[in-house]
Amino acid sequence: MSRRSFQSGLSGTTSSGTSIRNASPRSVGESGANTLRIRGIQSIAVSCSICISPAGPRAMGADEATRSTREGKPRSWIFWDFLAGKNLLHWFSSQRRCSMSVPFIGNEVLLLMPEGRHLTTVRALLVDEGFVVSHTTDPERAIDLIAEKFYVCAIFDLDTPKRHKGVKWMKKARQASPQTHCFILSLEKCSAAAAISAYRGGARDVFIFKPEDLENIASRINAAAMETVRRTEHDRLMLQVQSTHEQFFRRMLQMYLELLEAREPDVSELYDNELPQCRILIVDSEPALSAGLTLSSDDGWVVEVVPLGSIALEKADEYHVVLVARSLPDLPGSMVATSVRKEEKSREKHEIFVYTYDPATPARVTLFEVSGNLGSSVSDPQPQHQAFTEKDARLVDVLGKPMNLPFPNMLVERLRQFRREAARRDRKKHYLSSFKAANYDFIEQYERQKKSIDAWLAGNN
């Protein structure tokens, strides 16, 4: 396109309100306009925006004017370099904005560059690509910004704040935000040593500012941003796959257990002699409680009595139920019961009670549940930084609220209820073992895939 055709097709209104029609670029610049909205340009049948410096151009070179029809594509921005004597500095295609039409999280770009026309050019380039651009000339502020929020890309001028110091701040930015794509931009020449240092420091790419390469720069920054989009979307899908897979696995297991449970009689309908054996340890120097319990060995009940708490601590792990008298000759009953609770190993849970039983009132027995927090008060915990006081040396009662039950009927019913719950747990364990045996290959594959997904997500985070 010739200078005459360019001038004759230019018309519009400047930001200051001046009407422009068939005006030359010189007159537009001298009018103080910063931005011009063009209604029509010969050979370019689209509307576009032109950013113009307040000072008019010195001349309209043929080479620069010809650039407006390069590759026959419409351009949305045209920049003029008036200070350096070059009329048309650069431009880029408005058609490339379509590449950023896919929304993504984190479309912000940080620029660490000095003020000037290069900053204006790069900022407009990125804005046209659909990015939200933040700018600073202070490297310390740049690191603070990257640490505070996520920037998909960060562009560091090689010579900001001093010559070749941009690589140093780029490395710090990589440490502050490893997920941010960092670029080095050299406004002048870039030595091979500086480029190698930048790549070794983690730069995704190194650019040299050239008007003819601006579209290539935009393309590479856009590709880095879209890579983050794809990675984020991939991680989201991986999490969904993992969650769906786990839900399916749990539902399949639940259906399998329910199917097996339906084939077996209900535990609550079984007689005592049909239930698994239940071993009961009574720790008491008085035989009154054990003598009052009507539990037959023919129905699977095994009852043993020991007089001392020290003996109970050695044997308690062999029993399902431990009943400890509150008063013992050697140790407090609460201490014995809590120690047994803490030493549980072979079984999921003991049924452990501290009790008081008075033969003078044989129709009642009082049970205390054990909290398992010997030596500390749950309701009034002591902060770690506080010094040890006399209050800490007091004996702490770890027993729960007392339950006064008719004896022996309600105590036997309580033991029977525990026995049935234990039978249900044993049955469920058997069902799980059966499921694992029948689906061993599937479970192995499931575990491998789950570990792979966990490793992938951990590596990306």
Image (tube, rainbow, N blue to C red):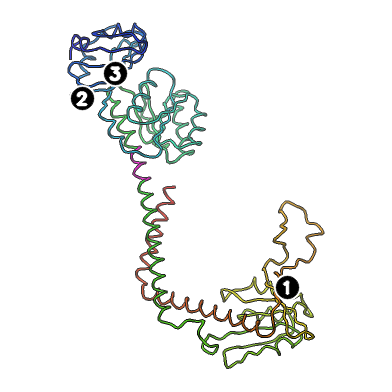
Disc on the earlier residue, 1 or 2? 2
Mark 3–mark 1 contact, CB under 8 Å? no
Q: Amino acid at mark 2?
A: Lys
Answer with the quarter of the image where residue 256 lies. Answer: bottom left
For image coordinates 61% across by 82% down, the residue present is 413
Query: Which of the 4 image quarters holds residue 60?
Result: top left
Instruction: Judge from the rendering whether residue 334 lies leftward or rightward of residue 280; answer left or right.
Output: right
Q: Earlier in the sequence, mark 3 or mark 1?
A: 3
Q: Which residues are magenta?
A: 225-232
Q: Nearer the viewer, residue 401 or 439?
A: 401
Q: Is residue 13 left or right of residue 280?
A: left
Q: Which residue is mark 3?
A: 78
Give the mark nearest the N terminus, 2 or 3.
2
Please report the residue visible at 75 percent of the width from the left and 79 percent of the height from the top: 356
Q: Is residue 180 above or below residue 329?
A: above
Residue picked out by circle 2: 73
Categorize mark 1 by other alpha carbons within 10 Å: few (<14), some (14-19), many (20+).
many
Can you identify the residue that label 1 sits on?
A: 334
| Image quarter of residue 30 | top left
Residue 328 falls within the magenta-colored stretch? no
In the rendering, at what x and y percent does residue 410 appear? 65, 82
**Principal secondary structure, stretch drawn in magenta:** helix
Q: Secondary structure at mark 3?
A: strand
Q: Around disc 2, counting alpha carbons within 10 Å, would you say few (fewer than 14), some (14 to 19), or many (20 or more)?
A: few
Query: Residue 148 location in percent, x, y?
Result: 51, 36
Determine the secondary structure under disc 2. Answer: loop
Cβ–Cβ under 8 Å for marks 1 and 2: no
